[in-house]
Image (spheres, rainbow, N blue to C red):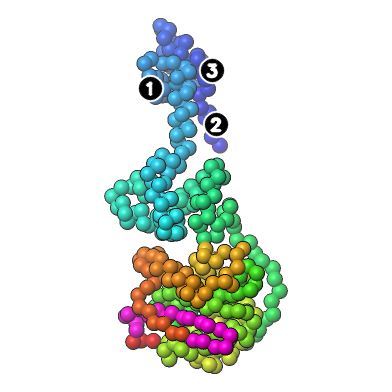
Amino acid sequence: MRLYTQLQCEERIVIKKMYYQKNISLRKIARILGRSPSTISREIRRNATHGYNEYEAHAKACQRRKDAKKTKCEKNPKLFHEVEKILVEKKYSPEIVAHTLKTKYPDTKAMHLSHETIYQEIYKRYHRDGRKDLVEVLFFRRKKRQKRANMNKNRFVDYEKKNIRQRSERANSRQEVGHLEGDLIESAKKDAYLLTLVDRCSNYSWALPLPSKDAQTVTRALIEILTEMPQGFVKTITLDNGKEFAHHRRIEEEIKCSIYFADPYAAWQRGINENTNRMYRYFLPKKKSFAHLTDEDIEAISEMINARPRKSKGWKSSYVFTRTFKCCTSNLKLRVVICITPKRICKY
């Protein structure tokens, strides 16, 4: 526990009266005030201007403490201007912004800061100055930072599902394309759905618009799309425990791949897909319906996401090599873009 307290204005008045009297040393002043001699010496050295004035010294000390509480962005307006510009114009996350500044100003440490500092600055300015526009550029748009909470829901247990722990090491290592992760995004009015898929190796993602989330529709869409891919490209698919994937055995038989399921309430086991969904949610907020969007609109969103620099890929985008396949049914118009890295194009 820290017992030291800052000098008060009353103590500075005593210092002023005794400092200019003869035969009174700094040690004697310290004994009278119950302070250390170094405290009195440092007070006069730091806060004296043209002589020592108690009120000027007190104002100077208060201003120094106030400046010490300022954040790095408050001390350097140019730095915050750069952060705000990248956030608003490019829609980058704070982590990408931090890396961009280090790349743009490699030798200027005054322009470097961590992504955690950016998050703190955004929320500080939101609560203090009402800067709602800064929170709006974040993916979640939350008014305050939240912690994960456990959810208690009863789910039907399918004992024929393959657990993610049974997945091969080749799929876990992320060194081979064709190992996918998938999930479903729901529109605000439950009038449209988006099936998102992402390749674990390349981080390339694409979205499939669906009119319904019943298991039959999702299964039919997945089969029609995945069968249009190069034979043998899809090796494994990791999904969550939603009822829309209840017909997984049929998908395995048609696609000739293995489907695995993450543990309930363990979204981090499909972290790549969850992070991808977070990016899609930036453009498709939970409180807004996206049923009016066309296939071209969904494709444009996917292109923006795939063009983002990725930390796991050395800050390079997932746009390396693309192939486009189209598929139409009586009720569905789906478009899928597959990404295959050049080094492994012949090894899938």
Q: Nearer the viewer, residue 82 or 163?
A: 82
Tell me which residue sits at (46%, 26%) in the image.
61
Residue range of the region highlighted in magenta in the rendering: 327-345
Indicate whether 197 appears above or below 227: above
Q: Which residue is mark 1?
A: 45
Left or right: residue 187 compared with residue 110: right
Dot 3 or dot 1, earlier in sequence: 3
Label 3, secondary structure: give it: helix
Q: Which residue is mark 3?
A: 10
Left or right: residue 323 compared with residue 133: left
Q: Position of residue 23 (x, y in %)?
A: 41, 7
Query: Which residue occupies the extreme right position in the image?
Result: 154
**Residue type, label 1:** Arg
Marks 3 and 1, how far apart at CA = 18 Å
**Residue type, label 3:** Glu
Quarter holding the C terminus is bottom left
Q: Nearer the viewer, residue 213 or 75?
A: 213
Label 1, secondary structure: give it: helix
Numbered tag placed on residue 3 in the rendering: 2
